[in-house]
Image (cartoon, grey):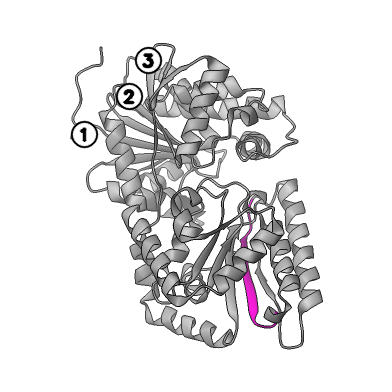
């Protein structure tokens, strides 16, 4: 029998992520200054602050040796209701780069040829244990605990075990921000059962799309013999709720930025600079799941098939550096740079360069300006949890009504397909034809598609995603 329901007002929220969403800088006098970083979960949970107080647990990125420095970091982070989970830097590296990003990340994104490392797996387990110890100690009776993403898939089980030993009860939610692969793909992971059992200790598990949710349920059935009915999974006498929660952005933030005079001036400058040309924009982390090499080959195919567009089209590709200390990402950056150089070398003239490659982060006002002037946004993910760049582009396109050309393997395509131009990212000809269709699309059709997409992102904001998940978690039996 579940215990008596607890009113939402009496339940505090604990948010857990691998890294805290704060930047910490030493002041020079032995003290530390912390400031909230932008994007991600900060925006997603902003809508909760008025109704549900929450504390944020995560690694601060630092592990000073002296206890006085750790206490000072705790004090500084405490001003933002954040609590550090300190990790040995070697352990943190092996957990993050060794297992999470070199083994788990590629398997979740259907990448083959992954080599399992027992050392990395042990580091992953150890970090999840440290998180569990810290949070179990800090959690109060009836707290809501919301765990985020693939770095902490073992945490729900470890945390529940500790809370039970301490006589505490809590509702544990887990949200995955990547795809969840088909059961056969997950079998490539030797620790598949441990990962699934870790997640199944949750009260509520959230996925971005229905396909991901169904894949998870199927894996639980095949690997663990769990029983599934509708949206619930029965495992070891526990009934676990699974659901799809559509994550989004804050469209108002983009509207406000575009309305600023200095951003409007920058939009005018870019419009004048690219006068007489169609602008195709790509904004991606430099990650192999984003299909950047596919995109470059597809754009080259377009120039080969439709030479009349040479000199009249420009691809602006923003590739934000990511995981630069991982060998595979270093090799990818080299390959992309070579592709850009090859294509520009072949098609450039003294007055024209077909690809503008920006291998660095772009300030938010500049990003909004780029979104605003782009006639097409080309996203070529080979696998992607959602891809919120699609949402951001739409938020900046009320005036131009540009076209979103979207890979069918981006999570966003599950919701936006009818109003976008879809293609398979490995089919260069299909990508080239999709780009041509977008460039030639009549104005009325573009406006109607933009209207539909704008209504979708306005209805599925980041704040709504956060509040909906917590509301559902608060209803569930522990």
User: Which residue is the site of mark 3?
Assistant: 164
Left or right? Give the position of 147 relative to 289.
left
Q: Quadrant of residue 219?
A: top right
Q: What residue sits 61% from the left and 56% below the top? A: 380
Q: Position of residue 71 (x, y in %)?
A: 44, 40
Q: CA distance from mark 1 to mark 2?
A: 13 Å
Q: Tally the numbered discs.
A: 3
Look at the numbered disc 3 and give the secondary structure of its residue: helix
User: Which residue is the site of mark 2?
Assistant: 170
Task: Indicate whether 170 appears above or below 447.
Answer: above
User: Which residue is the site of mark 1?
Assistant: 8
Look at the numbered disc 1 and give the secondary structure of its residue: helix
Q: Position of residue 134 (x, y in %)?
A: 44, 28
Q: From which residue to which does the magenta span run? A: 310-322
Left or right? Give the position of 126 relative to 70.
right
- Asked if residue 323 shows in the view, the reply is yes
**Earlier residue among tags 2 and 3:** 3
**Earlier residue among tags 1 and 2:** 1
Q: Residues within 10 Å of mark 3 (few under 14, many from 20)?
A: few
């Amino acid at each position: 029998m579940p215990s008596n329901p607890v009113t939402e007002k009496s339940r505090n929220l604990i948010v857990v992520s691998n890294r805290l969403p704060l930047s910490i800088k030493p002041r020079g006098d032995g003290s530390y200054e912390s400031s909230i970083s932008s994007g991600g979960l900060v925006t997603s949970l902003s809508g909760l602050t008025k109704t549900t107080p929450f504390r944020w647990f995560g690694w601060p990125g630092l592990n000073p040796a002296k206890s006085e420095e750790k206490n000072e970091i705790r004090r500084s982070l405490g001003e933002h209701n954040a609590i550090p989970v300190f990790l040995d830097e070697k352990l943190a590296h092996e957990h993050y780069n060794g297992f999470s990003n070199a083994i788990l990340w590629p398997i979740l994104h259907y990448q083959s040829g992954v080599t399992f490392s027992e050392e990395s797996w042990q580091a992953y387990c150890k970090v999840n244990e440290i998180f569990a110890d810290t949070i179990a100690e800090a959690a109060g009776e009836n707290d809501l605990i919301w765990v985020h993403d693939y770095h902490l898939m073992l945490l729900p089980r470890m945390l529940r075990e500790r809370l039970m030993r301490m006589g505490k009860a809590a509702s544990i939610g887990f949200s995955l921000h990547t795809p969840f692969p088909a059961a056969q793909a997950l079998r490539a992971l030797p620790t598949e059962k441990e990962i699934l059992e870790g997640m199944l200790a949750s009260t509520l598990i959230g996925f971005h799309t229905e396909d991901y949710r169904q894949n998870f349920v199927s894996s639980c059935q095949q690997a663990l013999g769990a029983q599934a009915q509708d949206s619930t999974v029965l495992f070891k006498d526990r009934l676990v709720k699974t659901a799809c929660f559509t994550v989004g952005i804050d469209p108002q933030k983009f509207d406000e930025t575009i309305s600023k005079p200095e951003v409007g001036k920058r939009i005018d400058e870019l419009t004048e600079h690219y006068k007489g040309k169609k602008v195709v924009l790509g904004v991606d982390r430099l990650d192999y799941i984003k299909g950047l090499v596919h995109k470059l080959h597809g754009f080259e195919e377009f120039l080969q098939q439709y030479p009349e567009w040479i000199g009249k089209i420009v691809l602006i590709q923003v590739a934000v550096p990511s995981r630069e200390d991982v060998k595979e990402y270093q090799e990818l950056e080299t390959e992309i740079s070579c592709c850009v150089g090859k294509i520009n070398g072949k098609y450039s003239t003294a007055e024209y360069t077909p690809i503008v490659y920006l291998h660095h982060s772009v300030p938010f006002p500049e990003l909004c300006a780029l979104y605003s002037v782009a006639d097409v946004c080309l996203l070529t993910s080979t696998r992607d949890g959602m891809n919120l760049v699609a949402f951001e582009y739409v938020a900046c396109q009320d005036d131009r009504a540009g076209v979103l050309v979207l890979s069918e393997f981006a999570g966003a395509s599950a919701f936006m397909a009818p109003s976008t131009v879809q293609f398979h990212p490995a089919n260069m000809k299909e990508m080239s034809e999709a780009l041509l269709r977008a460039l030639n699309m009549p104005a009325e059709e573009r406006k109607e598609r933009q209207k539909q997409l704008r209504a979708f992102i306005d209805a599925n904001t980041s704040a709504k995603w956060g509040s909906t998940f917590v509301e559902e978690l608060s209803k569930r039996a522990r």
